[in-house]
Amino acid sequence: MKKIFKLTLVLAMVISSTSVYAQKLARVNFQEIFALMPETKEMQTNLEAFSKELQEQLEAIQVEFNNRYAEFEKAQATMNPTVKQMKQAELNGLQQRYAEFNQIAQQDFAKKQQELAAPIQEKLDAAIAKVAKAGGYAAVFDSMGFVYHDDAQVIDLNGAVKKELGITDAPAQ
């Protein structure tokens, strides 16, 4: 009888503590806070510079193609068929080189973006975790991922996380 009573008591305590604990939910707007972080502006500056480099290289290939194509257009009437065919193959190669470089440049840009964003995301994640642990929250959700939430039951931690990161309410530029 005592075992059943103890088991019932333990079960009741677990259920009651779980239901109280599960109601301690919070939300943050990850994108908003990420955009306000000073590191994000530096990341954007670096990405713009990297993008400019890639764009200049793409433009150089395009200029080379345009110049060779213009030469081909002027001289094609006097070219023998073999030379004309070689020049067309050369132009096709340049077009293919441009397309390949463009694809690689897009991949490199995405990789650079992830590389630069990762430490910022880690810092934000750490701040959210610190605030959540300090507040005793069972879970913190990104407010952009909610389909529905009751504001009265889900606490907004944006202000606390911004404070933890030293962010003022001034919008990022």
Image: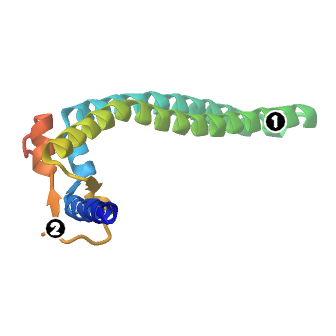
Give the distance between the C-alpha atoms of the residues marked 1 and 2, in whole angstroms: 67 Å
The secondary element bearing badge 1 is classed as helix
The amino acid marked with disc number 1 is: Ala
Estimate the x, y position of residue 136 in percent, counting from the top left. 17, 48
- Residue 82 in sight here: yes
Left/right of residue 9 with respect to residue 54 in the rendered view: left
Left/right of residue 159 with respect to residue 126 in the rendered view: left
Q: Kindly give the residue lying farthest to the front in the view shown.
A: 1
The N terminus - image quarter: bottom left
Task: Choose top left, top right, bottom left or bottom right for residue 42.
Answer: top left
Task: Choose top left, top right, bottom left or bottom right for residue 65.
Answer: top right
Q: Which residue has dot 2 on it?
A: 153
**3 or 159: nearer the eye?**
3
**Mark in the foreground, 1 or 2:** 2
The amino acid marked with disc number 2 is: Gln
Estimate the x, y position of residue 4 in percent, counting from the top left. 33, 65
**140 or 37: nearer the eye?**
140
Estimate the x, y position of residue 113 in percent, counting from the top left. 41, 35
**138 or 9: nearer the eye?**
9
The residue positioned 12% from the left and 37% from the top of the image is 164
Q: Which residue has dot 1 on it?
A: 89
Which callout, 1 or 2, points at the residue further toward the start of the chain?
1
Q: Compared to 170, does 61 lie above or below? A: above
